[in-house]
Image (cartoon, helix red, strand yellow):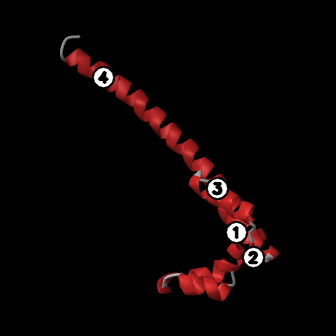
Amino acid sequence: MTLDELLEKVPEKWRPVAAEYGPALLAMTAEELWAWIHLLLNGKEDQAYQALLAKLDNPDLLAEWTRLNDCWQAANQANAERVALQKKALFALLQVLLTVALATVGL
C-alpha cells in the first residue's frame, strides 16, 4: 500500500496524522505491525511510540524523544514515590484519629 492509498482510506480529519506517521506504519512488516499493536494493547505506549519513531528514519527525532521520555519516566518515578509517602503519612494520621475516635465512645 502506498501513502496515497492509505490517505484515501482514512477519514478526512485523521489525514494529517496519517500523513505524518503513515510512512512509519507502512515501513513495518506484518510482524512488526502486530508487535506494535501488542505494545499498545499492553499499555506500553512509550515503547510503541519509540518503535514508530524508529521507522520514520529520523535519528535526531528519535534521540530527542528518547531524552524527553527518560525525563518523563524519572519524573513519574519521583511522583510515585511522593504519592506513596503521602499515603503512608495519611494512613498514620488516620490510625491516630481512629484511636481518638474509639476513645470518644469509650472503647
Question: Residues under labels 3 and 4: Cα distance?
Answer: 45 Å
User: Does the rendering let one see residue 98?
Assistant: yes
Q: Does label 3 or label 1 sit earlier along the sequence?
A: 3
Residue that badge 3 annotates: 39
Q: Which amino acid type corresponds to the residue marked 4 in the rendered image?
A: Leu
Q: Which amino acid type corresponds to the residue marked 1 in the rendered image?
A: Leu
Check the picture and name the quadrant holding the C terminus.
top left
Q: Residues within 10 Å of mark 1 (few under 14, many from 20)?
A: many
Question: Residues under labels 2 and 1: Cα distance?
Answer: 7 Å
Closest to the observer: 69 or 36? 36
Q: Position of residue 36 (x, y in %)?
A: 67, 60
Residue that badge 4 annotates: 98
- Residue at coordinates 76% horizontally, 72% vertically from top-left? 55
Q: Are marks 2 and 1 in contact (CB under 8 Å)?
A: yes
Q: Is residue 95 left or right of residue 23?
A: left
Q: Is residue 12 left or right of residue 37?
A: left
Total labels drawn: 4
Residue that badge 1 annotates: 52
Name the mark on residue 56. Answer: 2
**Residue 60, quarter of picture:** bottom right
Relative to 89, residue 78 above or below: below
Q: Nearer the viewer, mark 3 or mark 4?
A: 3
